[in-house]
Image: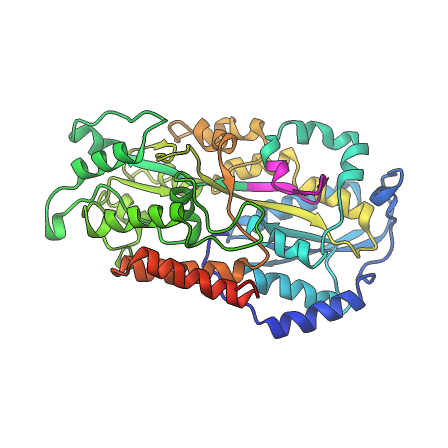
């Protein structure tokens, strides 16, 4: 979900989009009804025969979670063949372009798994069916949704309608090495700690020299990891309505200047271009780093890993962090909308959330799964992982995200190499505006 994104070929997209519009009513599946799309929902009979296709993505190991959900679905609908087209996402425009191409070829998916970074782009291509009528009528999904924090649901709503059900999610949190803190005589900071508190602690924890040097902090270099620093300073990479880039805003520049200073002025963090923060943390070469839940899963599952604890991200003007979620949608042109809804419910179900809790690489969507022993075991202050959704903001992902993200990355690379933050971010912002016709 957090890999670097390549720029999409607008020519290829235009061709695929045109074909998609021409064939928007086509799907590779046999009809099984769409009663719940707008009318009174009647669940398909258990003996219905059909073929459903999922456009799916994830990390190695995630397939087992999805296959278990498909198996549960097939117990109820044994005559429905489900094809799970699973891939690892390189960039969201490429993933969506593949969906558009499959639609154009008459092999459209019925169910689509997509993350926050690609949702606005998906909206712009009119890919998703509104789920609101299903949610309103289907009593079987009430208990699931009532156990999901409303902010996660809100992240997949537009113009008052719900288009996706959340599947799993992540937020950036601060991890710290408890032994290094103890050795330095540093107490656990308050959950409302500030940038100044953070810098003071990072300075005290930076010791030694050369190969024996330990740094107070290690920067992660993917965009998702930079976002909390912008958010906690009141900045962002895009406007609140996601209509324009704001890489050159005063608050964004100020946050990036602070990150550069950690490396080049204060010397409390190593040059991120030659360092993997997770590896350095595991090796006790840095005392703190920011990461999603997957780092806690790695550390909790490794008996040789350093003891750790979790904190909210430090704030400057605002307590915040970034979150990104994955969600399942029904393709608007599917001929199997009702069956797709039944499959979608299973893919997002409590049983699936229990599986995410056990796997531990992402936060489950339900409070029940997030507070289960399977998820909390070995994770100090594990409640902070799920409760961060109360103050987190979704990653700023406008429909031009695949232009915005690489421009931001190029700017950050230049800044960390010594470039002026204001100049580099202004250059990047101008590039994005020109590319999207907003210059």
Residue 311 in the image: x percent, y percent? Answer: 36, 31
Q: Answer above or below: position of 408 versus 368.
A: below
What span is in magenta?
152-168
Viewer-proximal residue, 45 or 333? 333
Viewer-proximal residue, 328 or 16? 16
Report whether 48 appears left or right of 362.
right
Taking the view exactly as shown, the residue that stands out farthest to the left is 209
The reply to whether residue 89 is visible in this rendering is no
Residue 150 in the image: x percent, y percent? Answer: 62, 31
Report whether 13 appears left or right of 45.
left
Residue 260 in the image: x percent, y percent? Answer: 27, 51
Q: Is residue 346 magenta?
A: no
Report whether 372 appears left or right of 220.
right
Report whether 295 appears left or right of 335.
left
> What color scheme is it?
rainbow
At x 71%, y 39%, the residue is 160
At x 65%, y 40%, the residue is 348
């Amino acid at each position: 979900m957090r890999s670097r994104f390549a720029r999409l070929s607008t020519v290829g997209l235009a061709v695929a989009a045109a074909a998609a519009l021409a064939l928007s009513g086509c799907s590779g599946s046999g009809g099984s009804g769409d009663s719940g799309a707008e009318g009174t929902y009647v669940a398909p009979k258990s003996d219905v025969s059909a073929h459903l296709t999922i456009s799916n993505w994830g990390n190695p190991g995630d397939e087992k979670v999805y296959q278990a959900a498909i198996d549960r679905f097939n117990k109820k609908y044994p005559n429905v063949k489900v094809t799970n087209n699973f891939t690892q996402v390189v960039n969201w425009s490429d993933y969506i372009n593949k969906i558009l191409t499959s639609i154009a070829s008459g092999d459209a998916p019925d169910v689509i798994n997509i993350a926050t970074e690609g949702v606005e782009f998906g909206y712009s291509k009119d890919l998703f069916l509104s789920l609101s009528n299903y949610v309103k009528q289907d009593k079987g999904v009430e208990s699931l949704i009532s156990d999901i924090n409303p902010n996660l649901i809100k992240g997949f709503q537009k113009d008052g309608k719900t288009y996706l059900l959340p599947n799993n999610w992540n937020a950036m949190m601060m991890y710290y090495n408890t032994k290094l803190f103890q050795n330095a005589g540093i107490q656990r900071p308050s959950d409302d700690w500030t940038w100044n508190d953070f810098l003071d602690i990072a300075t005290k924890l930076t010791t030694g020299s050369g190969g024996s040097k330990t740094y107070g902090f290690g920067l992660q270099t993917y965009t998702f990891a930079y976002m909390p620093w912008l958010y906690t300073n009141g900045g962002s990479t895009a406007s609140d309505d996601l209509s324009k880039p704001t890489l050159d805003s005063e608050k964004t520049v100020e946050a990036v200047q602070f990150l550069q200073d950690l490396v080049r002025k204060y010397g409390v963090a190593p040059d991120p271009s030659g360092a993997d923060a997770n590896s350095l943390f595991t090796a006790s070469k840095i005392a703190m780093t920011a990461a999603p839940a997957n780092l806690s899963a790695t550390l909790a599952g490794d008996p040789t890993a350093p003891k750790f604890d979790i904190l909210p991200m430090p704030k400057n003007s605002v307590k915040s962090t970034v979150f990104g979620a994955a969600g399942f949608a029904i393709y608007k042109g599917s001929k199997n909308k009702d069956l797709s809804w039944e499959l979608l419910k299973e893919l997002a179900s409590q049983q699936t959330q229990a599986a995410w809790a056990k796997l531990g690489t992402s936060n489950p969507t339900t409070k029940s799964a997030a507070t289960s022993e399977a998820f909390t075991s070995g994770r100090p202050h594990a409640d902070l992982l799920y409760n961060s959704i109360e103050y987190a903001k979704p990653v700023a992902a406008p429909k031009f995200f695949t232009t915005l993200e690489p421009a931001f990355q190029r700017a950050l690379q230049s800044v960390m190499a010594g470039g002026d933050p204001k100049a580099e971010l202004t250059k990047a912002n101008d590039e994005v505006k020109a590319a999207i016709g907003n210059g």
